Amino acid sequence: MLYLSHIASLGAIFQLPATGYALLYNGVMAVPTLPLSPTDRVFVLTGAGVSAESGLKTFRDQGGLWEGYRVEDVATPEAWDEDAARVWRFYSQRRRDAGQAEPNAAHRALAGLEQRLGDRFLLCTQNVDDLHERAGSQRLIHMHGELFVSRCEDNCGRPPFPDRSLYESEEAIARCACGARIRPHIVWFGEMPLEMERIQREIDRSTVMLVVGTSGAVYPAANFVRWAGPRVRKVYIGPEEPMNAAAFTQIVLGNAGEVLPGLLQVV
Ligand code: OAD
């Protein structure tokens, strides 16, 4: 079983300065385009970094979300049991922020790549915002859930539903038809990420893996690069090396919105 988890220490991220956008992992300057053949299948994993240039906070960067909140207070089933209103206040603020944000050049470049590749493309995001779909992505998995969706806390059988409401107090929390409270459709730590079988299948048949803007601190997503076969090209894009850097074929240092439009000019 693969539950959402993260490593105990976040202090070991090896910081490199953002030196532009074309540094190969072995230190050789790379041409910032991604060559793709007509038979390549591309699996993309994105994290909070892809939405950073849209003004949304990442989790672990300086000033990030986890600097202002403890994971245990807002992103675990225990936190929900202890103080559901506190949890909803956190996600209500996330709803406000994401509702005001707009997709950036990185979201649009990934949607453009999907247009060109069709079924040979899958985008798996750890992000719960809706910026990928608003940029036009369709072959998309939200493995950590969706911010603008809620569901019954008791899993009574009624399906998750679209919800943009803000709940700031225990009394304000809406009730499911079964009487239980509704909760965010978010995968909390200790819960199972969504659609893992489909993700595993798509990784198995991919020939290229692009990982964008994720620190490599949260599992199972941090292991996807290791699940991919040895012949899969594995490229990381972000301003600093992720914690799982050694597993990549190539690391392209830079902001996603600056790197991806050029990188994905497929040749
Ligand atoms: P993190 O905050 O851990 O990592 C964000 C990454 O984005 C860092 O490695 C940054 O270097 C990078 N970054 C910052 N700005 C960027 C930019 N402009 N372009 C590209 N990269 C940039 O966020 P995640 O790895 O996404 O889970 O976190 C994974 C999960 O942990 C989240 O889905 C969330 C969190 O706890 C849940 O809440 C369920």
Image (spheres, rainbow, N blue to C red):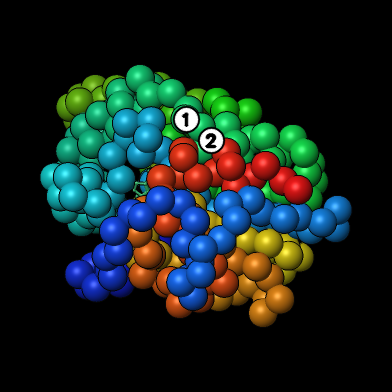
Whether residue 215 is visible to the viewer of this picture, yes or no, is yes
Q: Amino acid at mark 2?
A: His
Relative to 135, does residue 242 appear above or below in the rendering?
Answer: below
Q: Position of residue 219 (x, y in %)?
A: 42, 67
Residue identifier under label 1? 104
Marks 2 & 1, CB-CB < 8 Å contact: yes
**Who's the residue at 58% across and 52% down the image?**
32
**Who's the residue at 64% across and 45% down the image?**
264
Whether residue 193 is visible to the viewer of this picture, yes or no, is no
Q: Badge 2: few (under 14), some or many (20 or more) residues near its Cα, within 10 Å? A: many
**Who's the residue at 40% across and 51% down the image?**
20
Q: Position of residue 207 (x, y in %)?
A: 73, 65
Please give left or right for residue 157 compared with residue 49 in the image. Answer: right
For residue 56, which quarter of the picture?
Answer: top left
* Secondary element type, mark 1: loop
Residue identifier under label 2? 107
User: Observer-nearest residue: 209 or 124?
Assistant: 209
User: Observer-nearest residue: 37 or 226?
Assistant: 37
